[in-house]
Image: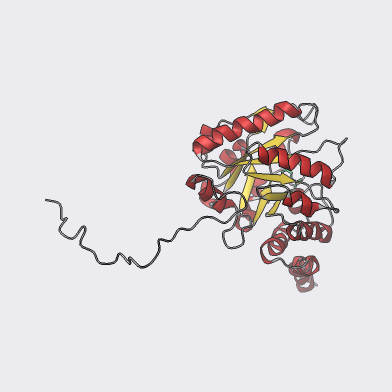
Amino acid sequence: MADTDDATGGTRFHPAVPARSYPFRLKGCGSLDWGMQSRLARIFRPATGRTVMLAIDHGYFQGPTTGLERVDLSIIPLLQHADALMTTRGMVRSTVPPAAGVPIVLRASGGPSVLKELSDEQLAVSMEDAARINASAVAVQVFIGGEFETQSVHNMTRLVDAGQRYGIPVLAVTAVGKELTRDARYLRLATRICAELGAHFVKTYFCTDGFDTVTAGCPVPLVLAGGKKLPELDALTMAYQAIEGGAAGVDMGRNIFQSDYPEAMIRAVGAVVHESMKPQEAYEEFVRPHTQQADGAS
Ligand code: R5P
């Protein structure tokens, strides 16, 4: 017989203590399902509400990008410093160690290569496969103002519908064609459209004037896109200004893996994002390890 004698006889009900609940305090995610909030809490550190995502998905349209020729050699050692890894299912299954424990933000759109019209993307991963991979989120490119604008928005809304069914958040990546200006007016338009149509978080570029109006006008978290490789101090300054302007983190690729010292760089970015370290101080942290190494060698 089951031992049930004491099953309901406890005294630790604490009737005077109101029930506690612990919602994940991330902009715009309070009404999401538990699974969504749980996955977002893997990507955005609960202690800071911010994230350092390492973006290495470039190969999906431009092949073996400089710095990503051998992901096994160049990227895997960096994973311990990343809050999430943005990559493709091919790279996940071939190269990312399952035991690394890094949350995956899975590239879920694709089609055209750099040789064609980039906005002509389709969905490239089913939500079922994203769940099989244990993705913490899926990412889709949205080309506001691009030739295939509507198609890319529909890719996103279909992905959001599927994500809602599985509890998997969708990251909308606002892609800016060469002919469009990355100013606050454009970025407000693009990010707001993505959020209104259901994206759970949005990746967008920085603009020097009015970035805070971009974050303010977007009801879900914004993560900063890194863009092309800059001198490290400039990249850290951009990250700092974006965080000060209300970004909930960065999703940075080339500015980390194309640095001569990627590990020092991702650590410096982490200090800016999670500790609000000033860019100059973070830069000094960045240069210290290799200056010391060089001093030791001489
Ligand atoms: C395309 O727009 C993708 O999202 C990129 O492949 C990538 O995430 C860009 O990262 P970054 O500009 O920081 O190198």
Q: Residue at point 77% right, 67% down?
A: 278
Q: At which x and y percent is residue 42? A: 55, 52
Q: Does residue 104 lie above or below 128 as drawn?
A: below
Rendering quarter of residue 296: bottom right
* Camera-nearest residue between 172 and 198: 198
Q: At which x and y percent is residue 255? A: 77, 52
* Camera-nearest residue between 94 and 137: 137
Q: Residue at point 58% right, 49% down?
A: 29
* Camera-nearest residue between 69 and 173: 173
Outermost residue on the left side: it is 1
Q: Residue at point 72% right, 63% down?
A: 272
For the C terminus, which image quadrant? bottom right
Number of numbered discs overlaid on the protein picture: 0
* Quadrant assignment for ligand 1: top right
Q: At which x and y percent is residue 221? A: 66, 50
Rendering quarter of residue 294: bottom right
Outermost residue on the front side: it is 16
Q: At which x and y percent is residue 157? A: 63, 32
Q: Is residue 30 left or right of residue 275?
A: left
